[in-house]
Image (tube, helix red, strand yellow):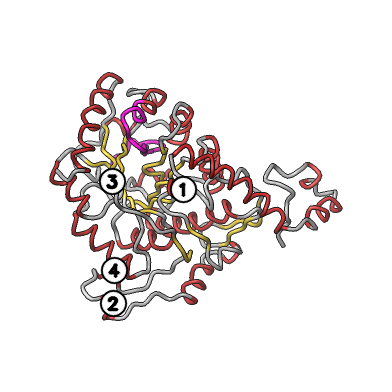
Amino acid sequence: MRVGMPSLRRPSDAVLARDRPTEIARAASRSRDGIADERDARAGERDRKAGERHGVTDCRDTMPVTRRMCRGYDRVADGMDGVRDHQDAEATETSDERRGDMPPWTTAPVQHCWSGRNPRTFGTMKFGIATFVTDEGISPLVLGPALEERGFDSVFLAEHSHIPTSRQTPYPSGGDLPRKYYRTLDPFVALTAMASVTNRLLVGTGIALLPQRDVMHLAKEVASVDLVSDGRFQFGVGVGWNREEMRNHGTDPKTRGALMDEMLGALIGIWTSDEAEFHGSYVDFDPIFAWPKPVQRPHPPIYVGGESDAALARLARFGDAWFPRSNTSPEKLREVRRWLTVQGLPDVPFTIFGAGKDPAKLAGYADGGVERITFLLETMPESETLAELDVLAQLRPRVSAGE
């Protein structure tokens, strides 16, 4: 049984003390509905302030998507069974007529873990930056204000905990692994620094390598950055590609996708429940308390990286936005949009990760219906970085105008 707590602050010492059951019983007798009302009132006030900061009257417009959790994640103890139960209740139509000319990965219905999205307006293209922040490049304390001053709406930071000296896994782009991969700052620390010196800039991971992280530490890191940034954190996630790196974290590369799916389910449970538990094949824990909760409700938007069949199924199951790489063609973008529409998810925002300056490709992203383009910013010293940002800023109006 879940124990209702009197507030979102840490449980009192009396509640945590195992030898004082009367205090626990007193806390349990508190109405969970009353607690939820208090929490919602506080969240509403934070949302109002965030909306004023972003120039909107409804703070939902500052997030790519919001969602309400489905049956099954009300009790996270059911693990992934909750996802399957919800899919049975609201099965997606998958007749041959509906599928028509859709790609092969549409042949099986996706098991949704949630049941609703707020409608979005796709009229205005947004522009952000994707980059590696290292100990040899521009400081995050300088980069953040520079982005905001030039009108970029967001920044997404890459991560690698380390690079093994054994280089068996080939670099996906070919050739030698660039120096920046060896020297990345922890993205949550760098993003916190950037949030502390900006007011509007959305700060996100691009991407966080979930299978290499501890789920409970990660839940606290995400919620903490969302709190100190006043609701500006964007959670970009992916499975990773460096097999030696993930093995050093105790992760089997062959099961990293299944592990990531369970981690996402567990994270959602921790963020949305005062007392959460999860029981899966790779993630398994009994009921826990974990605060703070994120400012954004029900949690920061989840950007799912990758273009594989598994990544797209993960997008439909857990994601609030798709985060495809810059080599994704307009045709693929349109295919995925049609597929998501068949799944009942026509308004999932697309953010391109790491775009270059080619006008034809930039125009193709717009034709493919993306909401945001993040330009790839190479890691350079401060003066060179600022000059490059000036160049990238000049591309924005041209792309928006369709040139």
Looking at the rendered image, the disc whose residue lies closer to the viewer, 2 or 4, is 2
Element at label 3? loop
Looking at the rendered image, the disc whose residue lies closer to the viewer, 1 or 4, is 4
Relative vertical location of residue 346 with respect to residue 250 in this rendering, above or below: below
Q: Is residue 362 left or right of residue 158?
A: left
Q: CA distance from mark 1 to mark 4?
A: 30 Å
Mark yes or no: residue 233 visible.
yes
Marker disc for residue 125 = 3
Q: Bin the neighbour count of mark 3 within 10 Å (Cα to Cα): few under 14, some 14-19, many 20 and up.
A: some
Question: Looking at numbered disc 1 in the image, what kind of residue is underneath it?
Answer: Gly
* Residues marked 1 and 2 touching at CB (< 8 Å): no
Question: Looking at numbered disc 2 in the image, what kind of residue is underneath it?
Answer: Arg
Relative vertical location of residue 368 with respect to residue 95 in this rendering, above or below: above
Residue ID at (57%, 58%): 284
What is the quadrant of residue 259 in the picture? bottom left
What is the quadrant of residue 31 in the picture? bottom right
Q: Bin the neighbour count of mark 4 within 10 Å (Cα to Cα): few under 14, some 14-19, many 20 and up.
A: some
Looking at the image, the residue that sits furthest to the front is 57
Marker disc for residue 250 = 1
Mark yes or no: residue 168 visible.
no
First in sequence: mark 1 vs mark 4? 4
Q: CA distance from mark 3 to mark 4?
A: 28 Å
Element at label 4? helix
Residue ID at (24%, 63%): 335
Residue for badge 4? 105
First in sequence: mark 2 vs mark 4? 2
Q: Which residues are magenta?
A: 146-168
